[in-house]
Amino acid sequence: MLGSRFRRVIINRPNLRIPFPPQFIERLRGKTVTAVSRRGKYLVIELSSGETLVMHLGMSGWFHVAGIGDRSREADPHDHVVFMMSSGQSVLFNDPRRFGFMDLAGRGQLAEYPALRKMGPEPLSKGFDGVALARACQGKRVSLKVVLLDQRTVAGLGNIYASEALHHARISPLRKASSIATASGAPKADAVQLAKSIKAVLTAAIRRRESPYRSARFRVYERDGEDCLRPGCGGTIKRLWQAGRSTFYCPACQR
Ligand SMILES: [Zn+2]
């Protein structure tokens, strides 16, 4: 999309998770994509008009990019949006469960965009470390897992990798968030380790994103009832619910 112009925009329904913004098609058509980036779980596409296209894949959303003259893809009822670019390529958004969305932030409004305004540091950036994590956990009486999923703590961490990171760090998801920080918000050793573990599991996940085998990708996620993979642990992975989300962990090695 970068450097290309929206030649035509097709939307096949009035909404995804939320309605498309007013004049969505008109505000895209003829505009050139000047930058493509990501913040947390949001895809951020800057336009020559000064507006920004903000997109989220939700649970099941994905993009299909068709090359010039490529007609090989058969029509699918879940193809909700098609961007026909001036490059000749088409970018198609497919989302069976429709938890994804597309929205436009007005000129100069991106910094104030509600979902992005209070978002925490990117997990793989220098701005995220044990100090930042401890500060976010200071005085919080809710469980550590819940604070990890809060996008104000760290951007983009989701349910799967929150569980994976806690297992990597040998820390129980049931612990109070405040337990990894001192009363003044300084990091304890667990905060430093957990920040490192978050970076480690995300970096490893990015490296093996090609793998189609889900079970091979996770050490605890959806492995309840199976043996802990930590050498010598001997524990059994358990599943529990925290704030409406499933958590997987090993009670034997996560304390
Ligand atoms: Zn274990």
Image (cartoon, rainbow, N blue to C red):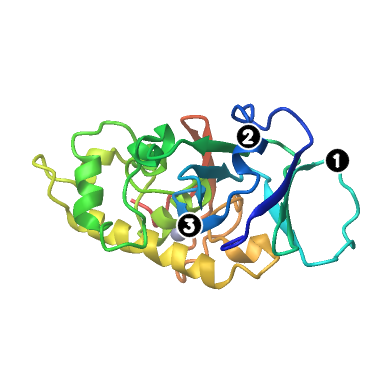
Under tag 2, what secondary structure? helix
Amino acid type indicated by mark 2:
Phe
Q: Disc 3 designates what residue? A: 37
In the rendered image of this protein, does residue 88 appear above or below residue 96? below
Q: Disc 2 designates what residue? A: 24
The mark found on residue 221 in the picture is: none
89, 61: nearer the viewer: 89
Q: Counting residues from the N terminus, which is met first, the one under dot 2 or under dot 3?
A: 2
Residue at (75% x, 63% y) in the render: 88
Label 2 and label 1: CA atoms lie apart by: 21 Å
Label 2 and label 3: CA atoms lie apart by: 20 Å
Q: Disc 1 designates what residue? A: 77
Under tag 3, what secondary structure? strand
Is 248 placed left or right of 78 in the picture?
A: left
181, 44: nearer the viewer: 44
Residue 197 picture location, percent across and down: 36, 62
Q: Counting residues from the N terminus, which is met first, the one under dot 3 or under dot 1?
A: 3
